[in-house]
Image (cartoon, rainbow, N blue to C red):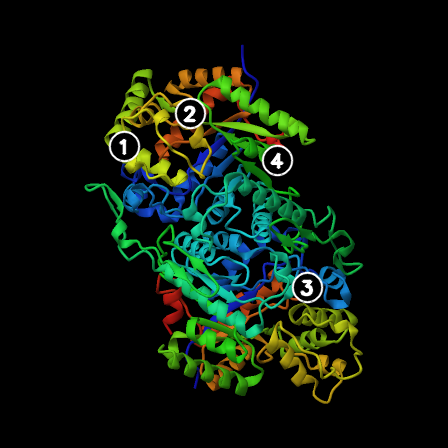
Amino acid sequence: MAADPFHLAWFTPFKTPAWKSPWAADTPLTWLNGEYYMDMARSLERAGFDFMMFEDSTLVSDTYGGSTENDLKHGLHSPKGDPVPLLPMLAQVTQHMGFIATMSTSFYPPFLVARVMATMDHLTKGRVGWNVVTSSEDLAGQNYGLDHLLPHDERYEMADEFITVVKDLWDSWEPGAIVADRETGYLADHTKVHPIHHEGKYFKVRGPLNLPAGPQGHPVICQAGGSPKGRDFASRHANVLLSAPKGVDQMREYRDDIRARAVGHGRAADDVKVMYIVQPVLGETQADAEEIARRRNELTQDQIETILGIMSITTEVDFKQFDLDAPLPDDVTTNGHQSGLEQFRKRTQGKTIREALMGQQTEAVELVGTPASVAAQMDEVMEAVGGDGFLIRGEPVRTHSRRYIDEIASGLAPELRKRGLIRSDYPESTFKANLAAF
Amino acid sequence: MTASPFHLGWFCNGTSVPAWAQPFSGSIGDDWQDAQIFVDLARAMERAKFDYVLIEDNTFVGDRYGDSMEVYLKYAMQAPRQDPMIVATLLAQATERLGIVATAGTFAYHPYLLARMAGTLDQLSKGRFGVNVVTGTSDRALQNYGHDGMDEHDSRYDVAEDFVRAMTALFDTWEPGAVVADRRTATFADHTKVRYADHRGSHFSTRGPLNSGPSPQGRPVISQAGGSPRGIAFAAQHADTIVAIHSSPEKARDYRDRVRDAAAAAGRDPDDVKVLFGVWPIVGSSEAEARQRADERVQLAMDNIDIPLATMSKSTDIDFSTVPLDTPLGELDLATNGTQNFALYRDRNATLTLRQAVAKEAGGAGPSLVGSVEQVADQLEAFADVSGGDGFLIGTNGVTRRFIAEVCDGLVPELQARGLTRTEYDHEHLRDNLRAF
């Protein structure tokens, strides 16, 4: 018996595609003109994806070894373009798919986020979402004049107030406020537009927003909370969650917990779609795919610098200082990305750092095989977990290429569709409605 | 005598649609939110070889006039208005050579956020982006961003000064050639060519480097509209192009001379600062038709005097619904911490009543440009001859596709035939095109 239909999305930064891939062509020097991502959007819409989600960060990191060298040499987290201006371009070359951009509650004023999102929602006719992040790096904060970010849990309190303000701004124009009535000479009815006069612990905002909300009203809210505070926040506000718990049992536990919390907040459990990050490895035969996966998992020096470099960026702990052939010291803590560090610590129990890296797995489940066999694996996983879909991630340094996109779009997606597991059309006009349709 | 060739820009009054109820405005009152009229505008500008389109902005719904949002919302006056950065991406995508300049308030962004947004737009547009830096003209805008109101006028420029320095430091964090993408050495970017901004100024601090990487122009173009002495000093130091509005070519020349002197005093080549004068022409198929429309414009302002008055209220925080209409302006106490252009307005109209001043300036504060295609071209040429300026920013209160066609398919071909405006783009980048002559 097959799983119920599930959602498919892609998780990516607005960064160079895998510049070390043999299929990179000239993209390492040209990706910032957006054309690669426009091609990608067209391909994924053809494949029936629900949305593309652009994660983001806003720093060039020098945590690893006290130098920017590792971040820049490998192109790990930088350079990275701002996804917000890219989104309308992607929407122009597509008709149905949704697009999510990341904006941080630590760095944007709420009015600006409300206005940018409402504008994009209009321009795309209801196809955008906001990935709410609180940011996890002090080094990013220092780009915005902050010496330190707020403590982890307080960042979520601030985010909670932030998102409340943003929603109030979207609601500051009642439906029907724009009448465009030539007879009476009123474009907008001022009795239906209201200041919000918000004065809270963190923000003071007068309002109203200077344009009405777009077709979705509140655009799709996306979140990635893994910590208890993060889970609570996400289940209260998000329409879609991205996550990477390891293995089917943890995936199911996570989803059940989020759904229960959502109900606790007075929402329907189905209002929150939990999506899992995966990185399918596809080959013409099972043996091909396994060979690709084997090479991908080889722990070269390059790969060590990549993995530990990324860990260093998000946790702000310098992993270069540790002996690779000893366990992770017990006294390492972070005010940055907490679930990331905790997961790594779990993996290192009784192991050296090098041994732990060999079992490194960033995705929820490993998917390796032919398009047909991977589709069958995804089917099984979804049946066991209960929903709600997968976020494909092309490993950014070595895999993300037009060729990999096509393996997914022209190989895997048709197999999934043949089994009735993903959508064959977009019956609703907005991203949010398509997401809620199943 | 023929004036030297000059530049053309378009002054786009935000993305709002005050012309929504006019006879030739199509259905923009219903479909304004897809911004397609502005996309069409950009395509037309490019066809007519404009250097750039400037998207003006302010980020609040007015309510100063009569202490109500009614007039602003009823007439679609600067509201609703979409975010100019987002609209800019559509314009960039629809064009290949036109410069796109979007407005940003120094109160609404941290310099890092704006540097990254502008840097990304410069990349996406392949070097055609600029930022019009404004300091705000109303307490209301600031109140949307957590402030009680504006600082005193000149100290707003101190903030702007620090803001632009921080942003510039961020743009300069990537040396040319930092991105090598060299597979043989497995090096994407050379970290020795990427440095910290480490800016700690009077109002902003930022560490950097900018994580969006190098932008094609190095620093996106900076536009400004400083009219006051402090504003001129700021613009002369930082701007690549300046918007200025003067009714007489002599005053325009005087203003430009002051900008150029200030630029030289700041150690810049005055030719690197292009002063474009704002104009609101009425181009008809005949002189009589144009005159008729100019008269109607005055009549419309008189019949709906709350529209021009509310516009002034929005940028001055003065409630003009309480100001007597028939007392000479010179006898009234009208001070503002908002735009200093209002001080100029008050001074040049000191002997007129508010009603008379509104009638006189119904066509905008720029020179009177009314007539057939040939006549308006003559008028622009004569103005440029005396003002010596670098060109014009064309605008209208309430853009329609018809007005765009009148300018781009009527006036500009005539200017081109006279050798007054460009017939092709010399360069890929906006700044290079601005400096081409």
| B98 vs A76: above or below | above
Pointer 3 chain: A
| B263 vs A61: above or below | above
Label 4: which secondary element: helix
Q: Closer to the camera: disc 2 or disc 1?
A: 2
Q: Closer to the camera: disc 3 or disc 2?
A: 2
Neighbours of disc 2 within 10 Å: few (<14), some (14-19), many (20+)? few
For the point 63% across and 28% down, the residue is B262
* Extreme residue in the bottom direction: A350
Which residue is denoted by mark 3 in the rendering?
A: A76
Which residue is denoted by mark 2 in the rendering?
A: B347
Pointer 1 chain: B
Which residue is denoted by mark 4 in the rendering?
A: B431
Which label's residue is closer to the chain start, 4 or 1?
1
Instruction: Tell me the amino acid under the disc marked 2.
Output: Asp
The lab-note entry on whether marks 2 and 1 share a chain reads: yes
Which residue is denoted by mark 1 in the rendering?
A: B305
**Front-lying residue, B119 or A148:** A148
Q: Quadrant of the N terminus of chain A?
A: bottom left
In contact (CB < 8 Å): disc 1 and disc 3: no
Distance from Cα at disc 2 to Cα at disc 1: 21 Å
Pointer 4 chain: B
For the point 72% across and 74% down, the residue is A295
